[in-house]
Amino acid sequence: MIQIYGAGISGTFLYNYLIKKGYSANIFDFRKSPDCRCGWGIAYREAKELYSLIELNLDEFILVKPEKVVINGIELKNKGIATFDKLRLLSELWKGIEFKEKKADLIVDATGAERAFLPKIKDDRLLPTMQFEERHEKEENIYIYFKRYGYAWAFPLGDCWHIGAGSIEESEIPFLIKKLREKFGFEEKKNICSCKARIRMLPPSKCKPFVHCNVVGVGESIGCVSGAGEGNTPALKCSKILLECIEKLENYEKMVLKEFKWIEMEQKFVESVFKRFPAFHLLFKIIPYERKRLVCHSILDFLRIFYEKV
Ligand SMILES: Cc1cc2nc3c(=O)[nH]c(=O)nc-3n(C[C@H](O)[C@H](O)[C@H](O)COP(=O)(O)OP(=O)(O)OC[C@H]3O[C@@H](n4cnc5c(N)ncnc54)[C@H](O)[C@@H]3O)c2cc1C
């Protein structure tokens, strides 16, 4: 018997996949409705393929496939980022689940930034964020306002937009959002909803142990979030790896670390930027990978973004 705690992206995927493969599993979340605090961006192709494993058609939840990602003043072609209705997708998955807590041989910690069941991480790094949902009439691109200590974003959702920011300096979040509004013309409006949340800014290698006694972590609880804050597709991938290792947990750590080498690199780069000594040499590995999956950009584009006075 497997007991999953946390019915976010990783927990719901893992639960459905385990059931499909004939395992006995239960899932429990302490919320009454899904936690949708997220920009709702997703690496479309990878997520579509992964969700097909549990017979979920991601296309039914896709909101916008933006043409461009505009960072500070620089326009880049969007290769693979879509926005999806995360609340509706999770609500749909929740409909098919009866939450239960039962004695189990294995407990899965899928509680995201909370990491409620695995041992706490010494020097954990949880980046504060703030986000609003608002109505705007604008060309449906992804807009980013980037500074050394964080960034603000605008993600198109069809009728509405997610406008938010995350920063290592929490007090700078309103400033980042203000600058994004000025730069891209998102005037301040009455919001439809607002939220605050934290993102784990540590790579998997710094979130050990992944397995402790009869508890195993998955998704953001073990650092499967990129330096840019991308955690949805990594949470799905990590759940798939866990299922593949469920009978041989001794292989799990190695497989997660191998899959998410790119997250290690991105987080290392971001940390060097936070510390004001950007490790630019890492871009030679990071950018080709990002070009393949997400956004068509080059090292030169990155340097222009980095050094542009905004
Ligand atoms: C503001 C913001 C914007 C983001 N934007 C993006 C984006 O655009 N694209 C992207 O890819 N990623 C984004 N992310 C990151 C992404 O949302 C997460 O990395 C991803 O949701 C992690 O999935 P998860 O299943 O591991 O954890 P979560 O989605 O956090 O799910 C954890 C679940 O555990 C439950 N829980 C917590 N504690 C307990 C407990 N003790 N018992 C039971 N249940 C518990 C919670 O209620 C929740 O349902 C964003 C994050 C934030 C905060």
Image (cartoon, rainbow, N blue to C red):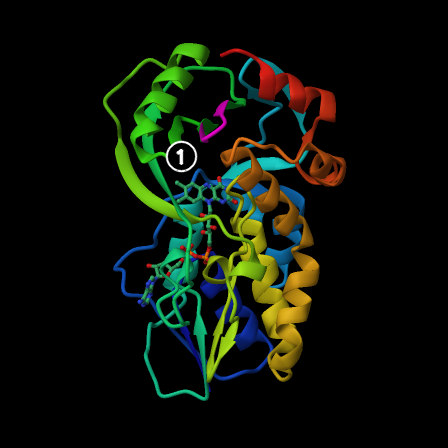
User: Can residue 101 be spotted in the picture?
Assistant: yes
The structure residue drawn at horizontal position 40% and vertical position 35%, both measured from the top left corner, is 166
The structure residue drawn at horizontal position 59% and vertical position 62%, both measured from the top left corner, is 238
Q: Is residue 197 above or below residue 189?
A: below
Quadrant housing residue 243: bottom right
Q: Secondary structure at mark 1?
A: strand
Residue 147, x across and y down, in percent: 48, 24
The structure residue drawn at horizontal position 57% and vertical position 38%, both measured from the top left corner, is 272
User: Can residue 298 be spotted in the picture?
Assistant: no
Q: Is residue 232 above or below residue 139?
A: below
Q: Nearer the viewer, residue 237 or 23?
A: 237
Residue 197, x across and y down, in percent: 33, 45
Q: Main secondary structure of the magenta part?
A: strand
88 is within the stretch colored magenta: no
Q: Is residue 103 left or right of residue 66?
A: left
Would you name the residue on which mark 1 appears? 167
Quadrant housing residue 153: top left
The structure residue drawn at horizontal position 34% and vertical position 85%, both measured from the top left corner, is 102
Q: Residue furthest left?
A: 190
Mark 1: amino acid = Ser
Q: Is residue 147 left or right of residue 204?
A: left
Q: Residues within 10 Å of mark 1 (few under 14, many from 20)?
A: many
147 is within the stretch colored magenta: yes
Q: Is residue 290 left or right of residue 32?
A: right
Look at the image and give the residue range highlighted in magenta.
145-151
Residue 95, x across and y down, in percent: 37, 62
